Amino acid sequence: MALVDWIKLLADLSESEKNNLSLFCQEKHLKAWEVLFFEQDEASAMYLLKEWKIEISRMHNGEKILLWEVQAEEILWEMALFWDANKRMATATAIEDCVLVVVLWFSIKELTQKHPDLMDKIKLIINDRSIVNKQKLN
């Protein structure tokens, strides 16, 4: 079983592709209230939340604004890789002890080039989150 078999976003990939992708992934564990990354950090990976929740927040006018919570089985920080000049636009903090799968940037980039439908799914997530961000920051 590949490390990424459980990820619904990747369901259309062949077993061989999932196995190859898994070679460039690793599991990461966070303790409650541990920060995964900070706003403006360089992006080098996308994360897939396997267990529990992570909050995404941003500083706006000197105040911490909660943008959303990422739930188990959702992707985390695709926006910086595909849209936002390779910088994290917010801070990700574990609400509870979490397990994530770290997907290195070059491997997901290669997959989205081979599978435009996967890129389309990621773009939909980015668009939805962008709308929420704008609403919360205005």
Image (spheres, grey):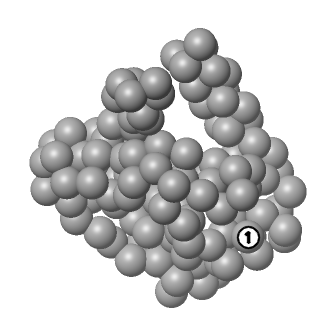
Using the image, determine if residue 57 lies above or below residue 117. Answer: above
Rendered residue at 60%/84% (across/down) = 20
Q: Residues within 10 Å of mark 1 (few under 14, many from 20)?
A: some
Using the image, determine if residue 113 lies above or below residue 50. Answer: below
Rendered residue at 20%/39% (across/down) = 95
Q: How many marks?
A: 1
The C terminus - image quarter = top right
Q: Nearer the viewer, residue 58 or 68?
A: 58
Q: Nearer the viewer, residue 109 or 131?
A: 131
Query: Residue 28 in the image: x percent, y percent?
Result: 29, 69
> At numbered mark 1, what does the secondary structure look like: helix, strand or loop?
helix
Occupied quadrant, residue 29 = bottom left
Using the image, determine if residue 124 lies above or below residue 107. Answer: above
Residue under pointer 1 = 109
Query: Residue 36 in the image: x percent, y percent?
Result: 33, 58
Query: Residue 21 in the image: x percent, y percent?
Result: 58, 78
The N terminus - image quarter = bottom left
Q: Label 1 is placed on what type of residue?
A: Lys
Q: Is residue 111 visible?
A: yes
Query: Residue 100 in the image: x percent, y percent?
Result: 34, 60
Q: In the rendered view, does 63 fall on the left or right side of 47?
A: left
Rendered residue at 42%/34% (across/down) = 59
Q: Nearer the viewer, residue 92 or 4?
A: 92
Q: Nearer the viewer, residue 122 or 40?
A: 40
Q: In the rendered view, does 40 fall on the left or right side of 123?
A: left
Rendered residue at 47%/77% (across/down) = 25
Q: Is residue 6 visible?
A: no
